Image (tube, helix red, strand yellow):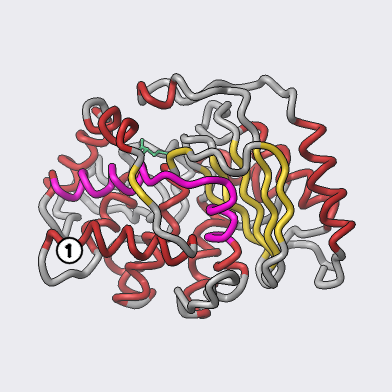
């Protein structure tokens, strides 16, 4: 697919945008008050190649909370600091096949593996970030996410307030994680940093740069900064391939065949390794919490361009 020219990419993006811009299936996340009121008709597709070519359609500069689309990048930070084996040993990399907020892995007293792309594992991953002082953990994480985006990212305050004052399911998860000895940092501050991570504001444009950094072997194609070691990029992409869409991950692999991660804010970032990234934004979600228009648009682009990892050529 290295031969894809700009015209072919533009046609694929335009085709997907037109095909799904009026789709009204799904609804914005209801369990976080500030997300329930998101404009359901927003829609953006941004495709960025590893050499920095960008094709955008729709609301590509509207900011939305990154939510779970941050999780692969936090896992990347943990691996960058401690090596991939630490993630395998201390957390786990097995797909759960369960909803994002499931208690799988911690409900029993015997540890079952988690993975860093479901909430329980993502909260644990936040506690595994190495810092000298606990108060350095959030600035370090925000800076790392910003290096993927190639510009300083910020918290979306209204959403952060809303998440912090609801979020009952994650409070239960962090308490169980603490009880079962998963956490390497204090429970309440770990949950607070996880909440902040979820409420980082991104545009589809910025999310595409984050994905394109993974597609480009860990080097940000805009700033040229090496953000993640190439051997760890492969492992982040493996995690995304197996668990990026929770209990919809199998269908996703079947239809798109690309490592990708969704967030309940309506974002998706998908990666065609060595080629390009696609970010979408549309707040209408499937029952599993994945953006409907986003999934269908990326599936269509992947099909059209033959991007699936499993494409035998
Ligand atoms: N912050 C959200 C939560 O923990 C993220 C979930 C998601 O995007 N699937 O509930």
Vertical placement of residue 144 versus 112, above or below: below
Question: At 19% from the left edge and 50% from the top edge, which residue is drawn?
Answer: 190
> From the viewer's perspective, is 262 left or right of 4?
left
Q: Residue 6 location, x and y as percent?
A: 84, 61
Q: Quadrant of residue 152?
A: bottom left
- Residue named by callout 1: 136
Vertical placement of residue 169 versus 93, above or below: above
> From the viewer's perspective, is 146 left or right of 230?
left
Q: What secondary structure is marked by label 1?
A: helix
Is residue 177 a member of the stretch shown in magenta?
Answer: no
Residue range in magenta is 189-211
Q: Where is ligand 1, by quadrant?
A: top left
Question: At 79% from the left edge and 44% from the top edge, which residue is drawn?
Answer: 300
Which secondary structure type mostly characterizes the magenta part of the structure?
helix
Q: Residues within 10 Å of mark 1 (few under 14, many from 20)?
A: few
> From the viewer's perspective, is 12 left or right of 309?
right
> From the viewer's perspective, is 4 left or right of 184?
right
Q: Residue 13 location, x and y as percent?
A: 79, 47
Q: Quadrant of residue 130?
A: bottom left
Is residue 195 a member of the stretch shown in magenta?
Answer: yes
Q: Nearer the viewer, residue 46 or 62?
A: 62
């Amino acid at each position: 697919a290295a031969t894809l020219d700009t015209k072919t990419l533009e046609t694929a993006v335009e085709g997907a945008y037109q095909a799904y811009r009026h789709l009204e299936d799904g609804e914005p996340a209801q369990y976080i008050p500030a997300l329930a009121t998101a404009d359901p008709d927003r829609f953006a597709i941004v495709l960025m190649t590893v050499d920095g070519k960008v094709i955008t359609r729709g609301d590509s500069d509207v900011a939305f909370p990154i939510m779970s689309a941050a999780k692969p990048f936090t896992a990347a930070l943990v691996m960058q600091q401690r090596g991939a084996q630490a993630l395998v040993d201390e957390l786990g990399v097995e797909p759960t096949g369960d909803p994002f907020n499931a208690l799988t892995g911690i409900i029993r007293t015997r540890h079952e593996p988690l993975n860093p792309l479901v909430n329980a594992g993502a909260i644990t991953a936040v506690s595994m970030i190495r810092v000298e002082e606990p108060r350095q953990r959030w600035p370090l994480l925000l800076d790392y996410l910003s290096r993927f985006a190639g510009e300083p990212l910020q918290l979306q305050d209204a959403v952060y307030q809303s998440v912090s004052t609801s979020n009952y399911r994650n409070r239960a998860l962090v308490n169980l994680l603490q009880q079962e000895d998963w956490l390497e940092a204090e429970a309440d501050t770990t949950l607070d940093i996880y909440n902040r991570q979820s409420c980082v504001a991104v545009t589809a444009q910025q999310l595409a740069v984050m994905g394109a950094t993974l597609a480009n072997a860990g080097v940000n194609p805009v700033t040229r900064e090496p953000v993640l070691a190439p051997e760890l990029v492969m492992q982040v992409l493996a995690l995304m391939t197996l668990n990026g869409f929770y209990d919809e991950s199998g269908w996703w692999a079947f239809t798109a065949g690309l490592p990708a991660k969704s967030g309940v804010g309506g974002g998706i970032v998908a990666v065609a390794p060595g080629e390009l990234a696609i970010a979408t934004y549309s707040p209408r979600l499937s029952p599993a919490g994945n953006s409907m228009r986003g999934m269908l648009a990326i599936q269509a682009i992947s099909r059209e361009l033959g991007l699936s990892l499993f494409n035998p050529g």
